[in-house]
Image (cartoon, grey):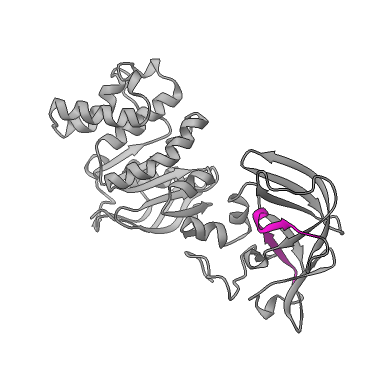
Amino acid sequence: MTTLSLQNITKRFKTHTVLDDLSLDVADGETLVLFGPSGAGKTVLLRMIAGVIDPDQGKILIGGEDVTDVDAEFRGIGMAFQNFALFPHMSAFDNIATPLDARGEKPSAIKAGVESVAKLLKIDHVLSHHPKALSNGQKQRTALARALAGSPPLLLLDDPLRNVDAKLRFEMRLELPRVLARQGATVIYVTQDYKEAMALGDRIAVMADGRIRQIGTPEQIYRQPADLEIARLFGDPTVNLLEVTPKQDAGGIYVELSNVRVPLPGAPDGVVGKTCVLGLRPEAIAFVDPSSAGAIPVTVEAETPLNEKTVTLVNTVRGREILLSRPAGTPGPKSGAAAIAIDSTSAFLFDKESGMRIATTHQVPPQGVAA
């Protein structure tokens, strides 16, 4: 059983704290995605797990064993990093075969293993080439193939699809989860692409400033973001964020958009009269007949078709901009006066000062953070 436990990990470079008292547990066979902006500490954390960098404080346990002071080559880890780290004097085939050869596999098993993973990553036609003859995308796939070929119990992948073209990247998002599940490895996957994080992760750990801001399933991260910044990071088009002051009447707590009452079911009494930020996902808003109950009058400013969806920009009566998203081919106004309805059960409410999401009774508190 290959579990990973990071306990109170701290790493500093001179006066700069890169990882700040970080703790994390990864289950056997789980794919955990480390997601966050550049400089969040993702790659440093990955290299620390690998044994390339030592922590200043804290412990690293793999399969329950403390490996904090164990050299990298004895940790039983497969790695694919952004800088490829291919042996320049060896062909792509020999680079991929390295972990199999180190295990003393028979030549026939090595050949079958290399060709299988190379075909998956669509580099089987360049196996005889040396790294200098490969494109950056082919180098990255060769490094990924080498990590996969050894079927290690713990696999560390640092943005392995970054230099891959868009078509293959999309295909690999679909194929990689199946391959990783088949290998049964425990995987730590680093990316700055939220779509990749959503597609590949059993759970996502959102990092910023050397800390984990939130950890949960892709659905939890998307539907229950812990704070404003996480809400912004996930979604295309981005979440609508509107400053509001909730009110209360006999019908409950609500806010107003274009002078129309929008209920906030489950909102706590403490938000009444307090300046907050309302978060609305574009797909939670729809055009409706202006005469329908609760219809919010708006003006359509622009429409942008984006293949599988159409994004529309509208303005409220007070001039606040809102983005709507609907499936491609769904009818909707292109300009002029219109009306929208909001699925308020999908709305988020954030504290303006702290940026933290305010928990409501109809939503489960986001995993990995205080409610």
155 relative to 139, above or below: below
Residue 292 visible in the displayed image: yes
Q: Name the side, left or right, on which 171 lies relative to 30.
A: right
Magenta stretch holds residue 275: yes
Residue beneath the point at 24% across and 45% down: 75
Residue beneath the point at 49% across and 44% down: 196
Magenta stretch holds residue 312: no
Residue beneath the point at 43% across and 33% down: 82
Q: In which quarter of the image is residue 320?
A: bottom right
Q: Out of 296 and 254, give the one closest to the viewer.
A: 296
Q: Quadrant of the C terminus?
A: bottom right
Residue 47 on image: x %, y %: 37, 42
Residue 77 on image: x %, y %: 28, 43
Residue 276 on image: x %, y %: 72, 67
9 relative to 103, above or below: below
Q: Name the side, left or right, on which 51 lies relative to 252.
A: left
Magenta-highlighted residues: 274-289
Residue 213 visible in the displayed image: no
Q: Name the side, left or right, on which 187 lies relative to 332.
A: left
Q: In which quarter of the image is residue 144?
A: top left
Residue 140 on image: x %, y %: 41, 29
Residue beneath the point at 67% across and 50% down: 326
